[in-house]
Amino acid sequence: VVGRYVTAFCYNSRYVGIQRIPMDRSYSKEEDIDMLDKSNPEFYLIDCSTDSVTGPMTEQEYNSKIVEVGIQDMCQWIPTDPPPSDAKYE
């Protein structure tokens, strides 16, 4: 649902926050991530209890949603580059 080019994530026991580079349909599958515009990332909030995804949102909308839902214990953003040491690829 979220797609490619996830640049960071955060989580708690119920939710996962995703930050990603917006992907214009003109990008090819071989597009170099370093060439993409990272200045206005999209944000998503995933509720793992209900499998619902909210987004894409701006950073301000994401932060407002976190407050609205009452989430107070998300971890710090974890960048995906370099990949976290325990990342698994399929």
Image (cartoon, rainbow, N blue to C red):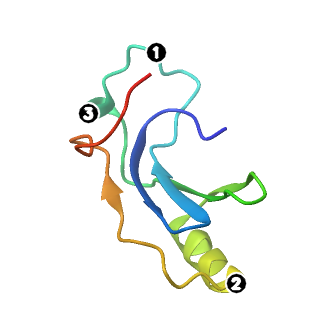
Which residue was labeled with disc 1? 29
**Real-space CA distance between mark 1 and mark 3, rounded to the nearest whole angstrom:** 14 Å
For the N terminus, which image quadrant? top right
Q: Position of residue 82 (x, y in %)?
A: 21, 41
Give the CA separation, mark 2 to mark 1: 36 Å
Q: Closer to the camera, 16 or 13?
A: 13
Q: Nearer the viewer, residue 19 or 49?
A: 49
Crowding at dot 3, Cα within 10 Å, few <14 / some 14-19 / many 20+, comes out as few
Q: Nearer the viewer, residue 86 or 18?
A: 86
Q: Is residue 67 left or right of residue 41?
A: right
Compared to residue 57, the image places residue 20 above or below, namely: above
Q: Residue at x 37, y 53 (%)?
A: 39
Contact (Cβ within 8 Å) of mark 2 with mark 1: no
Q: Earlier in the sequence, mark 2 or mark 3?
A: 3
Mark sitting on residue 68? 2
Report whether 18 appears left or right of 71. Answer: left
* Identity, as a three-letter code, of the amino acid under mark 3: Asp
Number of callouts:
3
Q: Which residue is mark 3?
A: 34
**Residue placed at 32% from the left, 31% from the top?**
33
| Apparent side of residue 22 relative to residue 79 in the rendered image (left or right) | right
Answer few, some or many: residues within 10 Å of disc 2's Cα (few below 14, many 20 plus, some between 14 and 19): few
Q: Considering the numbered disc 2 on the image, is that residue within a helix, a strand or a loop?
A: helix
**Residue 5 image offset from top left, x and y in percent:** 43, 36
Residue 24 falls in image quadrant: top right
| Disc 1 crowd, CA 10 A, few/some/many (<14, 14-19, 20+) | few
Query: In what element is the residue under mark 3?
Result: helix
Q: Earlier in the sequence, mark 2 or mark 1?
A: 1
